[in-house]
Image (spheres, helix red, strand yellow):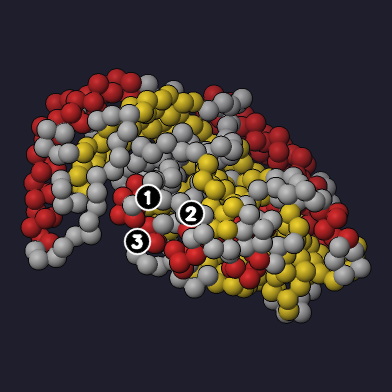
C-alpha cells in the first residue's frame, strides 16, 4: 500500500541533509492518501473520491535562528532539491526582511531526539479491494431493511467514508513511517405522522475497513426506535436537572468542555482560561480525562504531523487539571514537552494543537444504578453539536433527546430538542457517578474555529451530573 513513498524515500533523506547544511533543524513530512465516500438514499447513489487529506504531498520545516518556516509542494524528485533549497532561502530572507523592527515570538529549536519506527494498523476488509459495486449493494440492502422496520419510516439514508493514508517523517535524527485507515458510516432515518416529521441519526466508526458495516446493521432498530419516540416529544421546561449522559453525550462534553479549552496553542495566545488552573481542581474526583493513541479508534496514529511520537496524555487526574495537549512549536514556546497533538488538515496547511482520541476514564457504576438514584431528571442521548469558549469556559451543546426519569425509573416521556449549557468547572464538579463501560466514537471531524478539519474521536462511560437544560 502506497509504495510510491518507498521509491522517493532516499531522496527525502537527501533533501533533509541538504537543508541541514544551512539550517540547524530541518524536517520533511511526506503524505500519500486515498479517500472515498459512498451514499444511498431516495435521491439515488453517490460515489465521491474527494475529501479531507489533500492527496499526496510534502511539507518541509526549517528553523533559521529567528523563527520557523515551512514550504509545501506536491511534486518531488532528487533533481528538485537545489530548487527547493533555493526557494526556501529566498522566501525566508524576504519574510525576515518584512518583519522590520518587529521582534518575532522566540521559538527554540524543537527537540530532535533519535527515533525510528514503522507502524501499520490492522483491518479485515479494505473498501478499495471490496469495490464500489459491492459497497453500494451492501448499503442499499441495509437501507431496505431500515425502511421495512415500521410503516412510519419514510426515508433512510446511509453513507460510508474511508480514508487510508501513509505518512513518512524524516529529520536529522528521526525516520518514522505509519500507514493507517479509518472507516465511518452514518445512518439517518426520517419518520412521519400526519404533517409531523422527525429525524434520528447515528454514526459508526473504526480504525480499520469495511467491517464497520456490521455495526450499522446492529444499530438499525435503535435508530428507528429513537426516531419514532421523537414523534411524541415535547419542549423541555428550562432548568437545572440531575442527568445521566449516555457515552456519546459524555464524549461531546469531554470534547467541548475540556478538549478545546486545553489545546495549548491557545495558552501561547492567552486565549484559554485553562492555563491559570494547572494543578487545580476543575472537576469531581471521579473525573480522569485522557487524550492520545493508546486506544484504537479513528484518530489513532503512531506520530503526529510534526514527528512527535504519540502516547497517552492525562489531562485531568481525579479532578485536577494536570496539563494540556500541545504541538511542537507551542511546546517550545511554553517550555514543555509536545504531546503528539500537532496535526494538519493536509500537507498544505499549518500544524495546530488538535485533539485525537479524547475521553473520560471509566468508573464503577452502571447506567441502571444512575437512573435509580435520580428522583427527577433526564437521560440524555444522541448529541448533535457543541461549542465552547476557551477564554471564559462556557459550553453550549445540542442533544436530540432527553428521556424523563421519575422516582428512579424511565417514564417513557421524551423531550426534544435539548440545549445543554453551563460553566465548565461547575458541570464537571457536579459529576457524582461514572459508568464502568467505556465507548468511543470517531464518526466526526473537528475544526479549529471554522476551518482546519481533522478526524477525531471522543467518548467515555455513561455519567451522572447536574446540568442546565433548555
| Residue at image coords 19%, 44% | 63
Q: Where is mark 2, residue-wise?
A: 323
Q: Are marks 3 and 2 in contact (CB under 8 Å)?
A: no
Q: Residues within 10 Å of mark 3 (few under 14, many from 20)?
A: some
Of labels 3 and 1, the one closer to you: 1
Mark 3–mark 1 distance (CA, rounded to whole Å):
12 Å
Q: Which residue occupies 27% across, 32% down?
A: 171
* Sequence-first disc among 2 and 1: 2
Judging by the rendered image, the residue that carries numbered circle 1 is: 336
Q: Is residue 421 left or right of residue 35?
A: right
Hey, which quadrant is residue 431 in on the image? bottom right
Q: How many numbered discs? A: 3
State the residue lying farthest toward the front: 279
Q: Quadrant of the C terminus?
A: bottom right
Which one is earlier in the sequence, the residue at label 3 or at label 2?
3
Mark 1 neighbour class, 10 Å CA radius: few under 14, some 14 to 19, many 20 or more? few
Indicate the secondary structure of the residue bearing disc 2.
Answer: loop
Q: Position of residue 78 (x, y in %)?
A: 17, 25
* Mark 3, residue position: 268
Q: Is residue 398 visible?
A: no
Dot 3 falls on a residue whose secondary structure is helix
* Pointer 2 with pointer 1, Cβ within 8 A: yes
Q: Give the residue at x 49% y 50%.
A: 355
Mark 3–mark 2 Cα distance, whole angstroms, equals 14 Å
Amino acid at each position: 500500500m502506497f509504495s510510491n513513498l518507498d521509491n522517493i524515500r532516499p531522496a527525502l533523506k537527501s533533501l533533509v541533509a541538504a537543508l541541514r547544511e544551512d539550517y540547524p533543524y530541518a524536517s520533511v513530512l511526506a503524505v500519500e492518501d486515498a479517500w472515498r465516500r459512498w451514499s444511498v438514499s431516495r435521491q439515488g447513489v453517490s460515489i465521491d473520491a474527494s475529501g479531507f487529506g489533500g492527496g499526496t504531498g510534502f511539507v518541509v520545516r526549517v528553523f533559521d535562528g529567528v523563527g520557523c518556516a515551512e514550504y509545501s509542494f506536491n511534486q518531488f524528485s532528487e533533481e528538485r532539491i537545489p530548487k527547493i533549497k533555493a526557494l526556501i532561502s529566498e522566501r525566508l530572507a524576504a519574510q525576515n526582511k518584512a518583519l522590520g523592527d518587529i521582534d518575532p515570538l522566540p521559538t527554540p529549536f524543537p527537540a530532535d531526539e533519535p527515533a525510528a519506527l514503522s507502524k501499520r494498523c490492522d483491518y479485515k476488509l479494505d473498501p478499495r479491494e471490496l469495490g464500489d459495486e459491492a459497497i453500494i449493494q451492501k448499503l442499499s440492502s441495509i437501507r431496505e431493511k431500515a425502511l421495512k422496520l415500521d410503516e412510519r419510516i419514510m426515508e433512510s439514508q446511509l453513507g460510508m467514508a474511508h480514508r487510508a493514508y501513509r505518512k513518512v517523517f524524516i529529520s536529522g535524527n528521526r525516520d518514522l513511517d505509519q500507514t493507517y485507515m479509518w472507516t465511518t458510516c452514518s445512518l439517518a432515518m426520517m419518520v412521519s405522522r400526519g404533517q409531523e416529521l422527525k429525524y434520528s441519526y447515528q454514526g459508526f466508526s473504526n480504525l480499520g475497513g469495511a467491517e464497520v458495516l456490521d455495526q450499522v446493521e446492529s444499530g438499525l432498530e435503535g435508530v428507528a426506535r429513537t426516531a419514532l419516540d421523537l414523534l411524541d416529544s415535547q419542549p423541555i421546561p428550562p432548568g437545572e436537572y440531575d442527568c445521566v449522559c449516555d457515552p456519546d453525550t459524555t464524549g461531546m462534553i469531554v470534547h467541548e468542555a475540556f478538549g478545546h479549552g486545553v489545546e495549548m496553542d491557545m495558552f501561547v495566545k492567552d486565549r484559554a482560561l485553562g492555563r491559570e488552573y494547572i494543578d487545580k481542581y476543575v472537576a469531581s474526583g471521579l473525573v480522569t480525562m485522557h487524550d492520545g493513541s493508546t486506544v484504537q479508534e479513528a484518530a489513532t496514529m503512531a506520530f503526529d504531523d510534526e514527528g512527535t511520537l504519540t502516547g497517552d496524555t492525562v489531562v485531568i487526574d481525579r479532578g485536577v487539571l494536570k496539563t494540556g495537549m500541545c504541538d511542537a512549536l507551542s511546546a517550545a514556546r511554553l517550555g514543555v514537552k509536545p504531546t503528539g497533538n500537532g496535526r494538519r488538515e493536509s500537507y498544505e496547511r499549518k500544524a495546530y494543537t488538535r485533539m485525537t482520541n479524547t475521553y473520560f476514564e471509566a468508573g464503577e457504576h452502571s447506567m441502571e444504578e444512575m437512573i435509580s438514584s435520580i428522583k427527577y431528571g433526564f437521560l440524555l442521548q444522541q448529541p448533535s453539536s457543541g461549542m465552547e469558549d476557551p477564554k471564559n469556559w462556557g459550553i453550549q451543546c445540542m442533544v436530540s433527546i432527553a428521556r424523563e426519569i421519575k422516582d428512579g425509573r424511565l417514564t417513557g416521556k421524551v423531550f426534544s430538542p435539548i440545549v445543554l449549557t453551563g460553566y465548565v468547572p461547575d458541570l464537571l464538579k457536579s459529576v457524582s457517578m461514572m459508568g464502568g463501560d467505556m465507548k468511543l466514537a470517531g464518526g466526526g471531524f473537528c475544526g479549529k474555529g471554522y476551518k482546519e478539519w481533522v478526524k477525531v474521536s471522543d467518548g467515555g462511560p455513561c455519567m451522572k451530573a447536574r446540568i442546565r437544560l433548555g
